Amino acid sequence: MSNSEPYTDVTTLPADWRYEQTVAEIETIINQIEAGDLDLADVFEQFTQAVTYLQQCEAFLGDRQGQLDLLLEQLGDPSDLG
């Protein structure tokens, strides 16, 4: 992920989106903010970007949780196994 325009539609993640990479970007932003290396305007911009990334991660994990719940439900119902 780049530091360009934040991706705001978290319901549809870009094809090249990766959870681990996004978490690393969030950690980088937090480290920059904590280090005090940014101007105030940059802090707000980076904070906004981190929030967007967190929303993407939450959407991704929520989707995967739904898929996992469905699979577990199917496993728990022997009639669904054929």
Image (cartoon, rainbow, N blue to C red):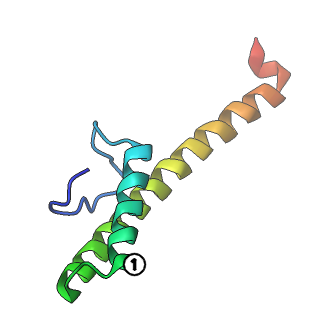
User: Mark 1 is on which residue type?
Assistant: Glu
Q: Is residue 42 above or below residue 40?
A: above
Expressed as whole percent of the image width and height from the top left, the position of residue 45 reads 22, 76
Q: Residue at x 68, y 31 (%)?
A: 71
Q: Does residue 51 appear left or right of residue 44 in this picture?
A: right
Judging depth in this view, the residue of 36 and 69 nearest the camera is: 36
- Tell me, yes or no, if residue 75 can be seen here: yes
Q: Does residue 47 appear left or right of residue 57 in this picture?
A: left
Residue 39 picture quarter: bottom left
Judging depth in this view, the residue of 70 and 13 nearest the camera is: 13
Q: Residue at x 26, y 81 (%)?
A: 43
Q: Is residue 40 above or below residue 4?
A: below
Residue count near mark 1 (Cα–Cα under 10 Å), binned few <14, some 14–19, many ≥20: few
Q: Residue at x 28, y 37 (%)?
A: 16
Expressed as whole percent of the image width and height from the top left, the position of residue 15 reads 28, 36
Expressed as whole percent of the image width and height from the top left, the position of residue 27 reads 42, 61
Residue ID for mark 1: 34
